[in-house]
Amino acid sequence: MVSEANGIERLVEALLFVAEEPAALEDLARALQVHVGEVEEAVGRLAEALSSRGLRVARSDGRLQMVAAPEASAAIERFLGMDLSVKLSAAALETLSIVAYRQPVTRATVDAIRGVNSDAVLRSLSAKGLIAPVGRLEQVGRPVLWGTTFEFLHYFGVCSLGELPTLPDLEAPPGGLEGSAPSATSSA
C-alpha cells in the first residue's frame, strides 16, 4: 500500500514506463493498492511534471500510456532510422477527421458525410493503426463502430482527444445530412 503522494506519482510513472499496452486507471490503482482518485491525481501531477520533458502521458477512454513528446519525433525518427511520418491522402485525412470528431461512428455515417464509399479508406486507416473498431451498433446488421487509437494521438502529437482543435458550427448542406456536421461542442 502506497501512502505518500509523490510515491504514487513515481510508481505510476514506473508502471506506465514498463506497460506494453495502454493501462486502465483501475488496473494502476489495483497494482498500487490505492483508490482510482489517488491515481488520477498522481497522473495529473506526472503529466504536469513531464510537460517540459521528452515524455508525455497520453490518455484515451480512461487508459493511459507513456509516449514520446511530439517535438522529439524528428530526432526519434533519425535515431531509429525509420520513416515515422506516414503520409495520408486527402481522402484519408477527411475520413480520419470524421471519425475523430464523430466517434464512435459507422461506415455508413462516414459515407453519408463524405458522399462516397469509404470502405477502402477505413481499411487503410485501420491497417495504419489510426482507427479501430470500438464496438457494434445495436441495429440490424450490427455495423462496426469506428474510433481513434493511441497511434492516432501519437501521429497528431496530442495527449488526448480534448486537445484537438474545435470546429466552428457548420450549417447542414442544402437538402440533407441534417446534424451530420461536427460542432464546436462535439465531444472528441
Image: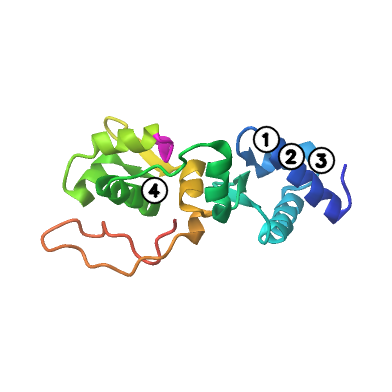
Magenta stretch encompasses residue 136: yes
Rendered-image quadrant of the C terminus: bottom left
Q: Residue at x 35, y 44 (%)?
A: 87
Tell us which disc is closer to us: 3 or 1: 1
Circle 3 residues within 10 Å: few <14, some 14–19, many ≥20: some
Residue picked out by circle 3? 33
Depth order, front residue of 94/83: 83
Name the amino acid type tagged 1.
Ala
Badge 3 or badge 1: first in the primary sequence: 1
Q: Secondary structure at mark 3?
A: loop
How far from the left and from the top, in percent, is residue 58?
A: 59, 49
How far from the left and from the top, in percent, is residue 39?
A: 74, 50
Residue picked out by circle 1? 19
Name the amino acid type tagged 3.
Gln
Which stretch appears magenta?
128-138
How far from the left and from the top, in percent, is residue 164?
A: 45, 59
CA gap, disc 3 to disc 1? Answer: 17 Å
Name the amino acid type tagged 4.
Gln
Circle 4 residues within 10 Å: few <14, some 14–19, many ≥20: some
Residue picked out by circle 4? 103
Depth order, front residue of 31/77: 77
Residue picked out by circle 2? 15
Depth order, front residue of 110/91: 91
Circle 2 residues within 10 Å: few <14, some 14–19, many ≥20: some
Badge 2 or badge 4: first in the primary sequence: 2
Q: Is residue 22 left or right of residue 181?
A: right
Depth order, front residue of 85/105: 85
